[in-house]
Amino acid sequence: MFLLTLMSQPHVNSCHRAREYIAVDCEMVGVGINGKESSLARVSLVDFYGAVLLDEYVKQKEQVTDYRTEWSGIRPRDLVKGAYLSYIFGLLFT
């Protein structure tokens, strides 16, 4: 997980500044021969206070050869209900 700063305005009080931070967590699955190539399978965004802004599974265009469930928690049934990445980008950037 990593933290994104949306804008930096040191003169704004801390209550307003808290809205500037979003944490991003991504889970990956393996595609291709022996699952060596990584593909985004889930993306989650939370705000400064931990409120969920986005939590989506990503439908795969390629066949998944390694779900990496031990680390990712992703199972085949999770991706069936996933959305295409273009749809998720639309949620983020519209």
Image (cartoon, rainbow, N blue to C red):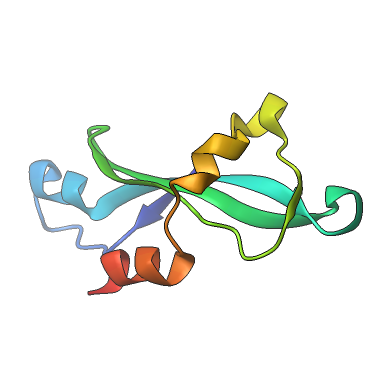
Q: Is residue 16 left or right of residue 52?
A: left
- Percent position of residue 83, x then y: 42, 57
x 83%, y 50%: residue = 35
Q: Residue furthest top?
A: 70
Above or below residue 62? Residue 69 is above
- Percent position of residue 45, x then y: 35, 46
Q: Residue furthest right?
A: 33
Of 27 and 34, which appears nearest the observer?
34
Above or below residue 33? Residue 92 is below
> In the rendered picture of this protein, how many numbered marks are placed on residues?
0
Above or below residue 52? Residue 56 is below
x 22%, y 33%: residue = 49
x 29%, y 49%: residue = 21
Of 26 and 62, which appears nearest the observer?
62
- Percent position of residue 71, x then y: 68, 29
Picture quadrant of residue 39: bottom right
Quarter of the picture containing the C terminus is bottom left
x 72%, y 57%: residue = 63
- Percent position of residue 93, x then y: 29, 73
